[in-house]
Amino acid sequence: MTKSKRLLLFSLLFAGLVVTVIIGAVAWFFFGDSTRERRSRERFDSVAWQSGQSRTNAVRIRMVDDLLSRHNFRGMTREQTVAILGEPDKTEYFRDWDMVYWLGPERGFMSIDSEWLVFQLDGQQKVTDYKIVRD
């Protein structure tokens, strides 16, 4: 192999490596938070859910996906829901909803807002709707 061919091959390999590193860095920038969030998910544990929730240890946000995959709250009474989740949080947010639970800082790249699990009850105190909302 001639010297010019080796230099060309080396240049192409080096350029390929640089492009790969740049693409990897950009991908991590845009998708790294979602990957980290998925890895930090936990199984729902009623005791942990009801224990001390803080902005630095938002355990509920890590458990909520498992909670919702295991429990269909629609039709449950308020008492049954409280037995699983504990008493709802006292907050001025989401006054149109009957029960509100703060989950933690919003998941994703820019965690500016918070995520909340909210419940609507009917006249018989049964859950008619529930969902995750952001403030």
Image (tube, rainbow, N blue to C red):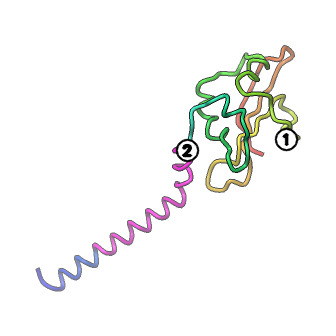
Whether residue 66 is situated above or below residue 73 in the rendered picture: below
Residue ID for mark 2: 40
Q: Secondary structure at mark 2?
A: loop
Specify the amino acid type for callout 1: Tyr
Residue 9 falls left or right of residue 77:
left
Nearest to N terminus: mark 1 or mark 2: 2
| Mark 1 burial class by Cα count in 10 Å: few <14, some 14-19, many 20+ | few
Residue 22 falls left or right of residue 76:
left
Q: Which residues are magenta?
A: 13-39
In the rendered image, residue 50, in percent from the top left (x then y), is placed at: 72, 32
The dot on residue 122 is: none
Question: Which quadrant holds residue 69?
Answer: top right
In the rendered image, residue 43, in percent from the top left (x then y), is placed at: 57, 32
In the rendered image, residue 65, in percent from the top left (x then y), is placed at: 60, 34
Q: Secondary structure at mark 1?
A: loop
Residue ID for mark 1: 93
State whether the magenta stretch is mostly helix, strand or loop: helix
29, 11: nearer the viewer: 29
Which residue is most to the top? 124
Q: What is the C-alpha distance between the residues marked 1 and 2?
A: 27 Å
The residue drawn where x is 83% and y is 19% is 122
CB within 8 Å, label 1 to label 2? no
Specify the amino acid type for callout 2: Ser
25, 90: nearer the viewer: 90
In the rendered image, residue 67, in percent from the top left (x then y), is placed at: 62, 29
